[in-house]
Image (tube, helix red, strand yellow):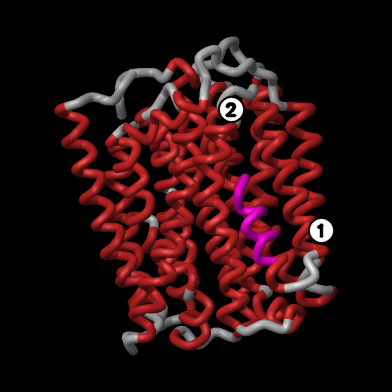
């Protein structure tokens, strides 16, 4: 971990523990809503197909449209909102998110649904980016990783509770209700952020040019590449987990909600523990977690042949992958302390590119006839390639320390 302390993330005044707790809960609630809209669509694709009268690939494009919105919106909205106080930016992004999801509820046809899903993805990365910066600014520098991980727990919790619940509602009472649920969570988030998140004036030197300056730094791009490549294996496995559990492990489709919940619980545990590790050493965490992900995926590929070990490794893989997120988020803040919102938001753009990359490569090896276990092995290779990028980043830092 670099020795410097980014001045833009240092707390101006000590924040009482009660204020800190409620502020983080408010920010994390937004993550729950974002996780529900992002992941529930995967479980409701058949209902969407029937409802809109479209093919399976066309339904899949709705997920791709959301991911594309994240990739486009993360740097764009973070840069445009650079001069705004962070609390106002977070409120604006969440309000945009609510309206976009409600527009999905009323979208009359496939074309308008594609547009609304792209729009709903736009504030995703920027919201997580600015909330990570807010959380980091409320605690001492030695606790930044913990604060960031607590905000990100909302995304993990959504997979344990929100996604299964929204999927059940969508299957039984209409898939469009998903967007009403998400809109409701978003409105609750707006109220909580307004009430509990402390106001902080924008940095006096903040500007679009200053934020975009982060893109000139090699370490920012290396951190993004670590996320894209190293985390691609997590998504290569997660995308095809239902097929693996039913076709290889032999579990009943009725057990799949338990599988998803175990994965989500692993993500919660990994996020929390990963934040603690990142506070000890950011790069040390990355160096150890990436080979750990590779090992977990290889063991998973063998363990899926038996139900008990498959369920155990589902939890382990979820935890191993999520260990990486707080460290990557903190690394981007370290690499660009004068443009924290954009740098932090780029982590979520990278994770969505990783999602697309992992799903594509996993589908490729399945199409080649290598079976449903093959994506996990592809993921193990990607994790090791990510480790290679991390080592290069560390070597570059030895010759040219991070900007302070």
Point out the stretch of residues depicted in magenta: 113-123
Question: Within the image, what quadrant is residue 174 found in?
Answer: bottom right
**Main secondary structure found in the magenta portion:** helix
Looking at the image, residue 48 lies above or below residue 350: below
Read off the residue under disc 2.
134
Q: Position of residue 320 (x, y in %)?
A: 41, 55
* For residue 212, side relative to residue 148 (left or right): left
Instruction: Check if residue 268 falls in the magenta segment.
Output: no
> For this rendering, which residue is in front, 374 or 60?
60
* For residue 281, side relative to residue 139 (left or right): left
Secondary structure beneath dot 1 equals helix
Q: Residue at x 62, y 76 (%)?
A: 59
Rendered-image quadrant of the C terminus = top left
Q: Residue at x 54, y 22 (%)?
A: 137
> For this rendering, which residue is in front, 215 or 188?
215
Residue 180 disc label: 1
Q: Position of residue 118 (x, y in %)?
A: 62, 58
Q: Residue at x 51, y 27 (%)?
A: 208
> For this rendering, which residue is in front, 33 or 110?
110
Residue 13 disc label: none
């Amino acid at each position: 971990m670099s020795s410097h302390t980014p001045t833009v993330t240092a707390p101006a005044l000590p924040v009482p523990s009660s204020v800190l707790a409620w502020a983080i809960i408010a920010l994390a609630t937004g993550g729950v809503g974002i996780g529900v809209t992002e992941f529930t669509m995967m479980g409701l694709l058949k209902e969407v197909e029937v409802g809109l009268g479209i093919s399976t690939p066309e339904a899949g494009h709705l997920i791709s449209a959301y991911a594309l919105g994240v990739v486009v919106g993360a740097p764009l909205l973070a840069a445009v909102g650079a001069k705004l106080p962070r609390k106002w930016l977070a409120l604006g992004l969440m309000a945009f998110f609510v309206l976009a999801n409600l527009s999905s509820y009323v979208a009359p046809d496939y074309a308008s649904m594609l547009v609304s899903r792209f729009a709903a993805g736009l504030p995703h990365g920027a919201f997580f980016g600015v909330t990570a910066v807010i959380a980091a600014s409320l605690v001492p520098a030695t606790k930044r990783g913990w604060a960031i991980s607590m905000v990100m727990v909302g995304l993990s919790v959504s997979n344990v509770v929100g996604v299964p619940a929204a999927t059940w509602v969508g299957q039984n009472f209409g898939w469009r209700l998903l967007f009403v649920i998400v809109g409701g969570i978003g409105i609750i988030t707006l109220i909580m952020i307004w009430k509990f998140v402390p106001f902080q004036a924008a940095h006096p030197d903040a500007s679009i040019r200053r934020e975009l300056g982060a893109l000139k730094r090699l370490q920012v791009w290396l951190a993004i590449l670590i996320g894209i490549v190293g985390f691609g294996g997590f998504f290569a496995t997660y995308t095809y987990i239902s097929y693996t559990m039913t076709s290889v492990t032999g579990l009943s489709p009725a057990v799949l909600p338990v599988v998803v919940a175990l994965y989500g619980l692993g993500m919660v545990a990994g996020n929390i523990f990963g934040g603690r590790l990142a506070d000890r050493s950011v790069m040390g965490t990355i160096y150890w977690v990436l080979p750990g992900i590779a090992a977990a995926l290889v063991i998973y590929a063998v363990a899926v042949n038996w139900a008990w070990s498959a369920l155990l490794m589902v939890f382990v893989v979820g935890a191993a992958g999520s260990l990486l997120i707080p460290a990557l988020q903190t690394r981007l803040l370290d690499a660009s302390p004068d443009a924290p919102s954009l740098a932090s938001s780029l982590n979520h753009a990278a994770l969505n590119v990783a999602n697309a990359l992992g799903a594509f490569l996993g589908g490729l090896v399945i199409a080649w006839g290598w079976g449903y276990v093959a994506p996990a092995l592809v993921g193990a290779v990607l994790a090791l390639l990510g480790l290679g990028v991390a080592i290069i980043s560390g070597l570059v830092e030895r010759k040219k320390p991070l900007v302070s």
